[in-house]
Image (cartoon, coloured by chain):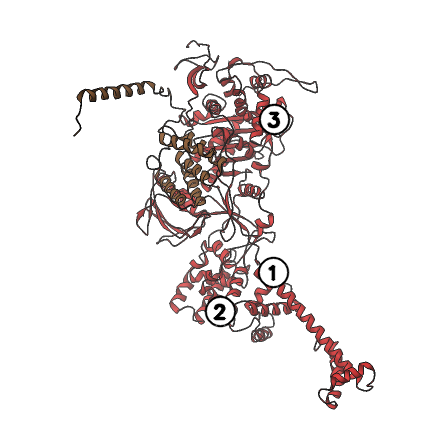
Amino acid sequence: MPVINPVATFRLLAILLLISVCAACQTPEPVLDNRYQRTIEDTPSASPTQSSSQPVIQLQNQALAAINEDQYQLAIDYLQRAIKIQPRNAWSWHYLADIYWRTGQYPRCLAMIERSTGYAVADDQLVMANTELLEQCQ
Amino acid sequence: MPGTPASRPKRQVAGRAAAKPKRKAPRGSAAKKTLAGRSGKSGQRAPASKKWRYIASILLLLLAFFSAYLLYLNQIIDSRFEGGAWALPSRVYARSLEIYPGLALTREQLVYELELASYSRSENQALAGEYRLLGASLELHSRPFQFSDQDQGDSVVQVFFDAGKVIAVVDSRAGVDLPVFRLPPLILGSYYPQSGEDRLLLSEDQVPQRLIAALVAVEDRAFFEHNGVSPLAILRALWANLQAGRAVQGGSTLTQQLAKNLFLTPQKSLLRKINEAFMALLLELRFSKQAIVTAYINEVFLLQQNQIAIHGFARASRMLFGRGVDRLEVEHLALLVGMVKGPSRYNPMTAPELALERRNLVLKIMLAQGLLDQQAFAKARAAPLGVAAQLPGLNPFPAYLDLVKHQLQLSYSSDELEHRGLRVFTAFDPLVQQNLERGLARGLARFKQPELQAAVVIADYLNGDIQGLIGDRVTDYPGFNRALMAQRPIGSLIKPLLLYSLLQGDLTLASEVSDEPVRIKQSNSIVWEPRNYDRQLHGRMSLYKAFIHSYNLPFISLGVESGGLEALAQNLAKIHLLKHDVVYPSMLLGTTEMSAYEVAQMFQVIANDGYFTPLTTIRSVTDQHNKTLSRIPLESHKLFDRARMIQVQRAMVGVSEQGTARYLAERFGALTLAGKTGTTNEARDSWFAGFSDRLLGVVWLGRDDNTPIRLTGSSGALRVWADIMELQGFSAFKLTPDDSLAWHYIDIENGGISQQGCANSVLLPIPQGRLPKLRSRCQ
């Protein structure tokens, strides 16, 4: 059985608390007036299992299934339908970029990553995925 | 020819001459005698054998001629019957309506879309191509459809609405909620061949057997027995005509009629009848009965609508009943079969009584032939004609179709467009177009200028779809398409791109500029002294203020002195809109001429954060068998800096809040919009371009003779734009966050840093590290 050291545990908690406070201090100031700017809530991006609308999730899933079967054109068709419904969905653009990478269409891949990144507000997972894909398409 | 005066004596002479030696000479000696005759050693028998040879030669010649004639006819059959017999117009489809919970769509809008797609309303359970209203919901039975990416069968779907939105979509057969349902697109128009024929083709297995049975019963009862020509039918017709003293009955078989319709002219002559008979025999020799009757059903002329001749049962069925031949009731089939005899005489739209009489006669024949029982006959006979109150318009959206054709012609020839039956899938949105047409009518009614013309483009700037287009104030007039063809100076619509060009230098929206007189000496030594539209001078102010009030002088002086003109030319070139090699200072005032379509392309890139997405009407093209010929992929090219473009967008929001388009703020309140007005010299052109969360609209008003219309961008096009957008329904425009920009309250009079709540202070994006030094006093 591992022995729990109460002093070490307290120290660890204190450090974590300090880090969180500092992180809060470094967070950029909120926008003064959100009349003009698109906020995170306005941006229907994030992952298909979270804030995408139901039809977009459905179409993205169909596109992913098509990608797995190497039916890239069919996948593109699904994603274009998804983008038509929710044009600022960053994941749809990311999946399009992914298909263009798989099919060797690198300039298109880069263009789609740019759009995806532009809409990927506060979605670290997607930003990382875009960064990885960007390296592969360059 | 036997029996003709010229040939008779020849036959008699030949007959006599040939008879004698045949009787006297033993069998087998002819060759020898012929040889002897030829050598001149056999005196008496030589003339007879010479005649035989003469006859044989003539017979051979006739045989050769006849063979050549048959080959010629056969070749005609080959080229038309087998090698794509019909010129098939290309069909242009609207976008597919994706119906899903949350979609902003009312039941009335869905009904409008369905009726445009020739769906008919039913009170009972809907059949394919029908819909019915169930309380606040709508149940539709969609038709099967071959999308460019997949085949979709027919579906029965119930759509529930609440507060202007779809709240649920249910598959009625399976009883499950659908996340999304794709409604097959309506046909928005066709490109017809020069012959003006329109038809839909049925394959052999698509032709309903009961249609064949009815057609054969009425037109050619011996169809399955004869070989293309029916001597008995000819004699029967001859007898009937003799008795009546006029032509009351024809003796042509279905195959002969097909041969006449397909290969020959309607001219009545003996030669044509002979050709027709031989072609019918050849058709029967080479093709199955099923193939022949299918060809007939596809070919026969049934209806005329304006300049277009409707051929074939499939197209006529769609036109008259709004459904395919496989879904017709027996009385509908009977009407169509009856119309074969006289499409004009029995046209149900213009002669309903005669058409009804003829239909009932066909029903009677069907009863007599055992194709109907007494009960079905009585029911069908009692039914009304059941045709549409009005034939659907063939091309009700001419301006959009014109643009589609313009874009298609870059890849397809006119021959392909008019003959090959291409299927063109577009971004056309009938609901957007409907609102566009209504809004335009409402807007133009304000001005009471009958000569005032208009061009409007509505596009989704995020994906480049052109959703609606108008090229004439009479929206269904297929004439000059001003949205595409009318090149007019754009006035101050150039300023957003000019502002972007200036922001590429050291300027920010807070930079102080002067609205003072400008004198520019041109290369021809003439001094150009431009003025503001209000002919006033306004002194010093922020660049933002100069923009929202569209003052000319600061932009001209900055353009000339700060390199803005060259940058503007480069930026126009990036989006393929630089029209001249030589750059003139007057370009800074928007003397460049553009069409509304080109203006829309310029504002697409501005609205979309600097991403250039080519505006398009076409999404994909397939052949008539649904084989994809081309696709227009979603393109996106980052041509401009996003942060600078966001500053331009913010200034355009200012135009609609405080500037020349503040009418929008008065009308729509808190719903933020971005836009720019444009007016040309002496108010000849009135422009407005603006965008919401997703929709971009460009409106031009002017006269074809270029005389003044006494409307500015603000008093003219802006009002029409607002009328259109109000009907479209829209979400507020919002700027994309960008870390390289910091938001500050700026005094728009002097560009200094101000505070929230101070007079003249507005919140503006300023590039990080370029905050103005000036601190403005709060007033």
Q: What crowding class fits label 1: few (fewer than 14 Cα within 10 Å), some (14-19), or many (20 or more)?
A: few
Q: Name the side, left or right, on which B556 lies relative to A94.
A: right
- Residue B473: image location, x then y, percent: 54, 37
Q: What residue type is labelled 2?
A: Ala
Element under label 2?
helix
Which numbered tag is attached to residue B217? 2
Quarter holding the N terminus of chain A is: top left
Disc 3 vs disc 1: which is toward the camera? 1
- Residue B426: image location, x then y, percent: 49, 43
Disc 3 vs disc 2: which is toward the camera? 3
Which numbered tag is attached to residue B248? none
Disc 1 vs disc 2: which is toward the camera? 1
Residue corresponding to mark 3: B591
Image colour for chain A is brown
Chain identifier of the residue bearing label 3 in the image:
B
> Are dots 1 and 2 in contact, CB under 8 Å?
no
Q: Which of B465 and B261 is in front in this view?
A: B465
Which residue lies at the image location 25% right of the left edge and 20% below the top edge?
A: A15
Q: Name the side, left or right, on which B170 lies relative to B543.
A: left
Chain identifier of the residue bearing label 2 in the image:
B
Q: Of marks 1 and 2, which one's residue comes earlier in the chain?
A: 1
- Residue B336: image location, x then y, percent: 49, 61
Q: Answer yes or no: is residue B501 visible.
A: yes
Element under label 3?
loop
* Same chain letter for marks 3 and 1: yes
Which residue lies at the image location 56% right of the left edge and 15% below the top edge?
A: B536
Q: What crowding class fits label 2: few (fewer than 14 Cα within 10 Å), some (14-19), or many (20 or more)?
A: many
Q: What residue type is labelled 3?
A: Thr
Q: Of marks 3 and 1, which one's residue comes earlier in the chain?
A: 1
Q: Nearer the viewer, residue A138 or B628?
A: A138
Estimate the spatial distance between the alpha carbons at disc 3 and disc 1, rounded to whole Å: 55 Å
